[in-house]
Amino acid sequence: MGRWLEHTVTSDINAPVEQVWAVWMDLEAMPRWMNWIESVKTLEDPSLTDWTLAAQGFRFHWQARISKQVEGQQLQWESIGGLPTKGAVRFYPKSENRTAVKLSVTYELPRPLAPLMEPSILGGIVTRELQANLDRFRDLVESGYCVSS
């Protein structure tokens, strides 16, 4: 068993919580704003998703199950195969048209990377990337992106 790393990032978004939630829940669109995520596919069971991450010459694959969903408030998940990962995103309405988003991601450091990367260095890289992703998400929402039905 490897070492687990956790990262938490936040962003304030100038949009109502309902809009922010709707854009986040368009899971298959995540590669639009998450640089390292190559694809997300919703499976026959809508609580299951299939993920592929490609970064720095490495590719990881896993399936995740939504373990808790409270509409407009929070989404929690954990992997059920492949890369061991879990996390949560929480939505905090700050006003009628402003929402704070807090994203926490925890994963087991993949064995091939363990001897190559000092966890504190990798942690800094991942935290910066997650923050950049969340900032792209904010920009996408604030640009008026609409989820197609």
Image (cartoon, rainbow, N blue to C red):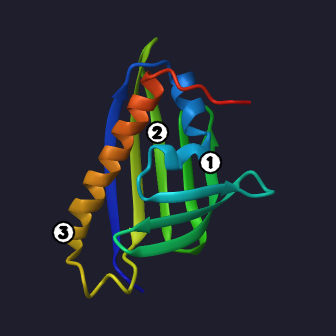
**For residue 52, side relative to residue 36 (left or right):** right
Task: Point out residue 14 in the picture as x, y percentages from the top left corner.
Answer: 39, 19
Residue closest to the far top: 96
Q: Secondary structure at mark 1?
A: helix
Q: Position of residue 33 (x, y in %)?
A: 45, 44
Q: Which residue is mark 1?
A: 28
Q: Secondary structure at mark 3?
A: helix
The mark nearer the N terminus, 3 or 1, is 1
Residue 31's x, y, as percent?
51, 50
**Position of 46 compared to 55: left or right?**
right
Q: Earlier in the sequence, mark 2 or mark 1?
A: 1
Q: Amino acid at mark 3?
A: Ile
Residue carrying label 2: 90
Residue sitting at the far front: 57
Residue type highlighted by circle 1: Glu
Q: Which residue is mark 3?
A: 121
Judged by depth in the image, the label closer to the viewer, 2 or 1, is: 1
Quadrant in which the N terminus appears: bottom left
Q: CA distance from mark 3 to mark 1?
A: 30 Å
